[in-house]
Amino acid sequence: MSHTCTTAALRMRRPQEGPGSATLTRPWDCPTAPPDFPSLLLLLYQGGCSPHLTPPRWPAGTRAPRAAPAACERNERKDVSGVIRQSQDSCAPRTIRQRVGLAEPAPDGEQTARGAGLGATGPQCRAWPSPWPSRAPYSAAPTQGPVLSGAALAQCCWGVFIILLLGNYWFIPVLYALWLYLDWETPQTGGRRSKWVRNWTIWKYFTDYFPIHLIKTSDLDPSHNYLFGYHPHGILAAGAFGNFCTEYTGFKELFPGFTPYLHILPVWFGCPFFRDYVLSTGLVSASKKSLSHVLNNDRGGNIAVIVIGGAEESLDAYPGSLTLNILKRRGFIKMALKNGAHLVPIFSFGENELFKQVANPEGSWLRTLQERLRKAVGFTLPLFHARGIFQYSFGLMPYRKSIHTVVGKPITVKQNLNPTLEEIEQLHQTYLRELSKLFEEHKDKYGIPDHESLIFK
C-alpha cells in the first residue's frame, strides 16, 4: 500500500535501490522544484503498480527530496488494510517481494488466489491503494459502474422505461412488461447468470482497484450445500459483489465444484432492465423460496451468500466501525436448519473503510428518517461520500482500501424440518462464537488493534 506522505497536492516518487538488482520506488513529499512535464506524465502513469518501469531521474537543478515527514508516520497508524505492514514510527522501504506483489507466506490452512498467484505464471503485479490511481484516471473510472449499480442505476432504468412508454416507442416497455410477467419467478429459482457478463473486463478493474482478496481457511465438501454469512454490510457490500459475482478474485480456484449465489432484496428485481443486469451477474432474491431453491440441490455444490446485517447495518458503516446487526437476525439460522445447509461465517476486513458517512447517531432526525424509509420500502439510503475521479477531497468514488474477505470454517448443521426456538437459539450462539473467533484470529493481520472486538447488536 502506498503511503500518502505529502506536503502539497502533488505526490512525487524518487528512485530507491532495494535488495538485489531490482529498482524500487518509495513515496515522498513534493520536492521544492517540480520535475519537467514528460517526467511528470511518466510518474502519473507509473502511480499504481509498475515494477517493470524505471522511475525517471530528477531533472538537473531540482533539490533532492527530504526525508519522509511525520505525516507519513500518522498515516501508517491510520492504515487498516495490513497488506504491507511497517513500523508505526518509520516509513521503511518496501521489500522486493512486496514491490512485485508476491504475498508473504500465508499461515497454515489459509489460501488466497491473489496472494499465491493461482492460475498465473511468474510474479503477479498487485495493485494497492496509492495517492495516484494506477494509470489514472482509467483504473478509477470503471468502479463508478458498480457504485451506480444500486439505487442510482435502478432509478435511471425506471426513467428510461417511462420515457419510452410516453414516447413513440411505447411498444418496447409494453413488450418488456409482458416479458417481466412471464419471467417474474426467475430470481427465486436460481436466477439467470451469464458467464460472459461475470467475465467482463470492467470487473477486473473493479476488483484490482481496491484490491479485493478472497482468503480460504478451510476446505469445503462439494457434496454439501453451504450458507455463507457475510459481514459487515458496509455501504454497498463491494467485497461480496467482487468475490461472488465476478470471476476475478479466484473463487473457482479456491472452491472448485461450487456455484455461489449472492442474495439481495427482492425489490430490486421489480425494476425494468436493471433486473436483467443483476441477474446476469449471479444475483438472486433473498426470499425464503429463493434460499430454499439454492440450498435444496440434491447434488450439493451450491453456496447461498447472505449479507446478514442488511440495510440496517449500512447505517453504522463508518471507517473503523465493528458493529454488526445480528442479535435479532435468526431467519438464516432457521433456513440452514430446515435445509441441512452448513453455515460458514465470513468477515470482510476493510469493507467499512471504503466510504465516509454523514453523522447519523441513533435518535437524530436523519437516522429516524432513514429508519422510516427502511421500514417502508425495505432498504435505506446512507448519505455517503468518499473521493472523486480527478481529486481526493470529495466524490462518490470509493477510497482505494484493500478488502480481505476471510472465509471461516464450516459449522456442521443437521437437517431439521421443524426446529424449535431452543435449537435455533443454540445454533445462533454457535455461529456468533465462530464469527468472533474468526475475527480475533485474523484481526492482527489486517491492522485491527488487539483491544478492538466485534460489537453485536
Image (spheres, helix red, strand yellow):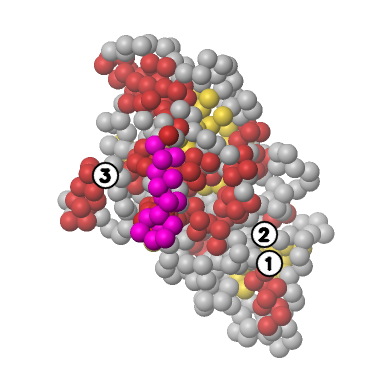
The residues bearing labels 1 and 2 have C-alpha atoms spaced at a distance of 7 Å
For the N terminus, give its image quadrant: bottom right
Q: As displayed, is residue 236 above or below residue 405?
A: below
- Boundaries of the magenta span: 164-181
- At a point 60% along the width and 84% down the height, the residue shown is 32
Give the position of the C terminus as an image quadrant.
Answer: top left
Disc 2 marks a residue whose amino acid type is Cys
Q: Which residue is mark 2?
A: 49
Q: Earlier in the sequence, mark 3 or mark 1?
A: 1
Identify the disc placed on residue 377: 3
Between the residue at mark 3 and the residue at mark 2, the CA separation in whole angstroms equals 43 Å
Q: Where 160 sits versus 216, above or below?
A: below
Image coordinates for residue 362, horizontal then vertical, percent: 21, 49
Label 1 residue SS: loop
Question: Badge 1 is on which residue?
Answer: 46
Q: Residues within 10 Å of mark 1 (few under 14, many from 20)?
A: many
Was residue 266 drawn as part of the magenta stretch in this picture? Answer: no
Q: Identify which residue, 312 or 325, lies in the foreground.
A: 312
Q: Are marks 3 and 1 in contact (CB under 8 Å)?
A: no
Q: Position of residue 231 (x, y in %)?
A: 42, 38
Q: Is residue 171 magenta?
A: yes
Amino acid beneath label 1: Gln
Q: Residues within 10 Å of mark 3 (few under 14, many from 20)?
A: few
For the question of whether residue 431 can be seen, the reply is no
Alpha-carbon span between mark 3 and mark 1: 46 Å
Residue 274 placement (x, y as % from top left)? 44, 48
The reply to whether residue 379 is visible in this rendering is yes
Which quadrant holds residue 209? bottom right
The secondary element bearing badge 3 is classed as: helix
Q: Is residue 336 above or below residue 398?
A: above
Point 46% across, 28% down: residue? 189
| Amino acid identity at mark 3 | Val
